[in-house]
Image (cartoon, helix red, strand yellow):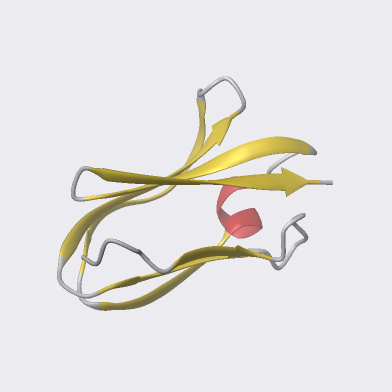
Amino acid sequence: LENNLNFNIYPNPANENTVIDFSLISKQTVDLKVMDVVGREVSTIFNGTLNTGDYKYNVNEQAKLAAGVYFIKLTVDNRVFTKKLVVE
């Protein structure tokens, strides 16, 4: 895994087509969650092992989020990446 993981959320603020995407350069253990502003887990989008490649997940298909501010937490082999997501 490179130091600068290609991890994006678009569009943001979210709509029904908001996508989380990331790329892996080798087989990795991945945990992708939606957290609320106080750090509670709202939804698990994916948890498991993924092979090398590009991955896309539709946030709304997975999480059904109400309006508010959330954080997308991507853990890849114990390295944690977070991005803010606004749902209007």
Indicate the position of residue 71 as horizontal and vertical percent values. 56, 40
Indicate the position of residue 77 as horizontal and vertical percent values. 18, 50
**Which residue is at 73% across, 45% downward?**
86
Picture layout, residue 88 above or below residue 11: above
Furthest toward the front, the residue is: 3
Indicate the position of residue 65 as horizontal and vertical percent values. 69, 42
Task: Determine which quarter of the picture holds residue 67.
Answer: top right
**Which residue is at 76% across, 46% downward?**
87
Indicate the position of residue 22 as horizontal and vertical percent values. 41, 68
Furthest toward the left, the residue is: 27
Picture layout, residue 87 above or below residue 16: above
Q: Quadrant of the N terminus?
A: bottom left
Judged left or right of residue 63, residue 39 is left
Judged left or right of residue 4, residue 79 is left
**Which residue is at 84% across, 46% downward?**
88
**Between 62 and 69, which is closer to the camera in this rendering?**
69
Picture layout, residue 38 above or below residue 12: above
**Between 57 and 12, which is closer to the camera in this rendering?**
12
Furthest toward the right, the residue is: 88
Q: Is residue 6 visible?
A: yes
Q: Is residue 64 visible?
A: no
Furthest toward the top, the residue is: 38
**Which residue is at 67% across, 64% downward?**
18
The number of numbered badges drawn on the structure is 0
